[in-house]
Image: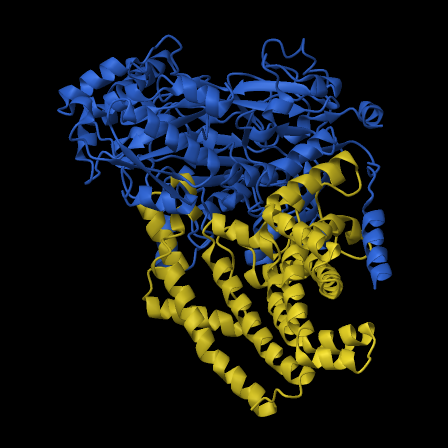
Chain colours: A blue, B yellow
Amino acid sequence: MRNILLLVLSVLVISGCTKHREEVGAVLNVAEVAKIKGMDPALAEDQYSATEVSRVYEGLLQYHMYKRPYTVEPLLAEEMPQISKNGLEFKFKIRKGVMFQDDAAFPNGKGRELKAKDFIYSFKRLADPKVQSTGWWLLEGRIVGLDDWRAAATKSGKADYEAKVAGLEASDDYSLTIKLTKPVPQFLYALTMPYTAAVAQEVVEKYGSDFLNHPVGTGPFVMAVYKPTEVMEYVKNPNYWPATFPTEGAPGDKEAGLLDDAGKRLPLVDRVVVRVLVEDQPRWLHFMQGDIDAVGIPKDNYAQAIGPDGNLTAELKEKKVSLSKDVAMDLTYTAFNMESEEIPQFKNKLVRQALSLAMDERESIHTFYNDMATLSQTPIPPGIPGYDPDFKNIYRTNDIALAKKLLAQAGFADGKGFPTVVYDTLADTTSRQMAEYVTKNLQKIGVQTKVNTNTWPALLEKINHRQVQLWGIAWAADYPDAENFLQLFYGPNAQPGGMNGSYYKNKEFDKLFEKARAMQESPERTKLYRQLAQMVANDCPVVLGVNRIAVSLHQPWIKNWKYMEFMTNAAKYFRVDTDLKKQLRK
Amino acid sequence: MMNYIIRRLLYTIPILIGITLITFFFFNVVGGDPVSIMLGKHANAQMIADMRHEMGFDRPLIWQYFDFLKQIVTFDFGRSYASKQLISKMILDGAPVSLCYTLPAFVIAMLISISLSLLVAFWRGGWFDKITVIICVAGLSVPSLAYILFGQYWFAYKWGMFPISGFQPGFPEMISYIALPVIITVVLSIGGELRFYRTVMLDEIHQDYIRTARSKGLSERVVMFKHVLKNAMIPIITNVVIEIPFLVTGSILLENFFGIPGLGNQIVEAINTSDFPVIKAQTIIFSLLYCVFNLLTDILYSLVDPRVSLK
């Protein structure tokens, strides 16, 4: 018996011994930190699914990979659209000769040419209630006739894709006109998102509800292996249209060698291998072993990667790994429920200002973000027009004396008579530690809190049903427009499921917001955005938190790498120095 | 015996109905509304209402319950809210993957712990027994996550004996991927199993018939294997058979850390995203398996112990 056991264990151990598999061609190895929710552009809600969808599918527009501030440029559109003077009509010319990838859904399995009607179909799909797209908000109330088309589909139980929508018109195979119900300058950003990518009707109809497992787009890569909970492999699309590497970038990009491949045909790698690595340790170890080419630094491995001087540790320097630090366009905040029945005191601005003053975000930046975050002065993060680097928010100064004074003015000197506040948070360790930190800060002015932990769905439901009093949350930009952050405080968004979870209602804010969001980018609009941001800073419907700094590492053999907030189809620009990789991995 | 089996199978029907009622109550009545999660951060009241209508959440609860029963009978649990994949396919794909490492680990752990339990029972009170018990208690005191983190870091990353994570279906490709999870599962199981079997063996060893067997001059080998082991089979069978349904569901931690696409991996994802259809389907299937294996335990009792008759 013992011999048999020894034999079994020996076989397990010996067969387990591993060596690096030899890679053929230039392979980009990346990791996703969450499981992919299918390859249907209409369902690409989370960043990870959107990134995977964008390898195969393309839309009319995209962000320029290297220019900053973020600039929109044509992708499947031949050029930027002609926009009517009133901002209501967008005329697109579709690029000719763009082919869908080969698939059994097409005659003889050969992909057909992309036409303007494909975009009309794809936009209708976003509106189709049966598709249950999470991207409908991008088009809702914006395209003439599309809401009515959706309403008819809801009523009849079946969408009629043959029915005309007045706001979507294809005068020929390469001309697309989109008519808006009102001027929406942010509409161009909507057309960069994977949601609005072109899908072929015949592919959708062939695969039905299994369409999400059969990606067929016009993009640079073709799906070769698809295991959404495990691994995905893409190969270079042999019929990809002649897209080329950009010749321009931001100042300093050329000198940094980021434009060395200018003019070359895209994509620059032969294959992309994506591993789904949810847990931090295996993801980090795979990076350290050189199996994956880029990684965000897990909290527990931070000290291993970054030294006390903020630079890479000797171990990583020896591996010639590169470090990238970029301010992310996001905002963390602690929200007050201003319609809370248990804490009606949150209606009082003085109370909110006092609580905001009590929170010491500087210490939290050190403790929870390893100093990789900056204090938010307004809801608009850096890098977006409307951000004001000179504005200092007096309610973010952690002035405890002033906080106590304001609380006393509100009738709660030293917190006496102030009800115990329930602080809702998530159940993970960091969230619980942050909640304890909030408790400690508020105790300084005599306000007592009780921490309540939740799963993410439970917390979201509580917020939607106004069952929260005080809670921590974050917002990541959908597009580089301050409107995306200021909408969190827009009165009509204060509804169950709406983005204004604080139920902040300020008529003056709403009026100015409506005016600003309909304006094209201009100094006047920036001025209005700053005015709105300062109103939020002064009224404190939330305690503003931080803007996080995205810290990531990438291997020395990866070339043309640049941090991008919105770009989901960046893989086509990356080059792998295969000789260097072989040499370093020996 | 046939009558007994049929009767026991019929008994499982009210049990299952009870389980469906509890499951339905928890997820459909008090479990909250998953629509906000499904729609993401840009949901508004109208979109939530539209989605609720599309999903049939605005239908009377009784009809929703009948739909749930129909799903169980047809084994068509619809699609996952989160991944939109067919749940029956997810389960059929995930269960064999979990079994790939849980089954060999289970067999190895069982053989090692039963064999060792015979030895420690034989040398009860001696240094081998004491050391084994100390090791078992020490092993049980360390959390499973520590074994996983340690094993993955040292055996896979530092010493390169195994891949860090991943899974490859097919034999022998899968061996290198499941080897470390199997070893960790065996190590995790042995402490508890061995202590349990040791107690069982010691109970038998002190029985009168063992004393009689020894006084008849039987060898220790015959005493241990023919008498002690055979008479200890009832608790062993109970322990072994009841563990089998857990093999199908896999280990949440191991699968997540080693990237094994089994059912454990699916469960954690489903809980994190309030993917109720997946959780409901897995709960029902697990309950079914539990009932079936319970019945199997009773049948096996009658095979190993002639005193037990099934009426």
Left or right: residue A299 compared with residue A526 = right
Quadrant containing the N terminus of chain A in the rendered view: bottom right
Report the residue at 20% width, 26% height from top. Answer: A415
Report the residue at 19% width, 18% height from top. Answer: A406
Rendered position, A269 above or below B210: above
Image-quadrant location for residue B245:
bottom right
Is residue A490 visible in the rendered image? The answer is yes
Rendered position, A293 above or below A222: above
Residue A438: x, y in percent? 35, 28
Report the residue at 63% width, 66% height from top. Answer: B199
Image-quadrant location for residue B307:
bottom right
Q: Nearer the viewer, residue B97 or B222?
A: B222
Residue A378: x, y in percent? 35, 19
Q: Nearer the viewer, residue B37 or B1?
A: B1
Residue found at the far front of this picture: B215
Left or right: residue A19 compared with residue A95 = right
Quadrant containing the C terminus of chain A in the rendered view: top right
Residue A334: x, y in percent? 34, 29
Residue A90: x, y in percent? 44, 30
Is residue A238 visible in the rendered image? The answer is no
Q: Count the numbered circles shown.
A: 0
Q: Nearer the viewer, residue A474 or A128?
A: A474
Q: Nearer the viewer, residue B143 or A489?
A: B143
Left or right: residue A412 compared with residue B296 = left
